[in-house]
Amino acid sequence: MSLKTVLLFVMLATIAAGLSCPCPRVYWPVCASDGRTYSNAQCMRCHKPNLRVIRQEPCRNNDIRPRTYEPGLYKLSAYAQNCACTADYQPVCGSDGVTYSNRGCMYCANPCLTVLYEGPC
């Protein structure tokens, strides 16, 4: 197999991989369950399919995932792995003074929080 054939195959595979998951160039930022902001939910799912949208806006400094320490690595705590943070936008003000997109996302961030009131803080 010649070098040209190998390069052509690699180029075609790269193009095909890019087409299999279209990521629109629309800036509608979302904060994901990994604590990072993605340009939109579709790009987030394209690059990291196991993530969930925490809120329909950029992440804040306090959007750090709850963690437990294990020797040699960090791992999401059990409640963060099994929580139900959906993309539904029904904002609540948490007892930590942070606006969460819904109750489920608030409890995913910290199960000890309570809702101060419905709506943004």
Image (cartoon, rainbow, N blue to C red):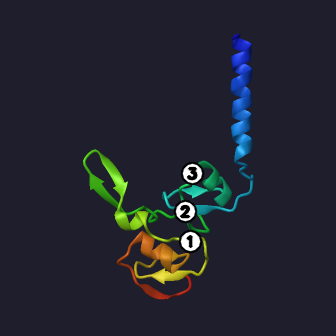
Q: Residue at x 40, y 82 (%)?
A: 95
Nearer to me, 62 or 73: 73
Circle 3 — which element? loop
Q: Residue furthest bottom?
A: 117
Q: Read off the residue under disc 2.
A: 52
Image x and y of residue 44, in percent? 61, 55
**Image position of 39 with respect to 92: above or below:** above
Whether tag 1 and tag 2 are in contact, CB under 8 A, the answer is yes
Q: Residue at x 73, y 37 (%)?
A: 16
Q: Residue at x 44, y 65 (%)?
A: 62
Label number found at residue 86: 1
Image x and y of residue 57, in percent? 60, 67
Q: CA distance from mark 3 to mark 2?
A: 9 Å
Q: Which quadrant of the figure has residue 109?
A: bottom left
- Which mark sits nearer the N-terminus, 3 or 1? 3
Q: Residues within 10 Å of mark 3 (few under 14, many from 20)?
A: few
Q: Read off the residue under disc 3.
A: 48
Whether tag 3 and tag 1 are in contact, CB under 8 A, the answer is no
Circle 2 — which element? loop
Mark 2: amino acid: Arg
Q: CA distance from mark 1 to mark 2?
A: 7 Å
- Which mark sits nearer the N-terminus, 1 or 2? 2
Q: Residue furthest left?
A: 71
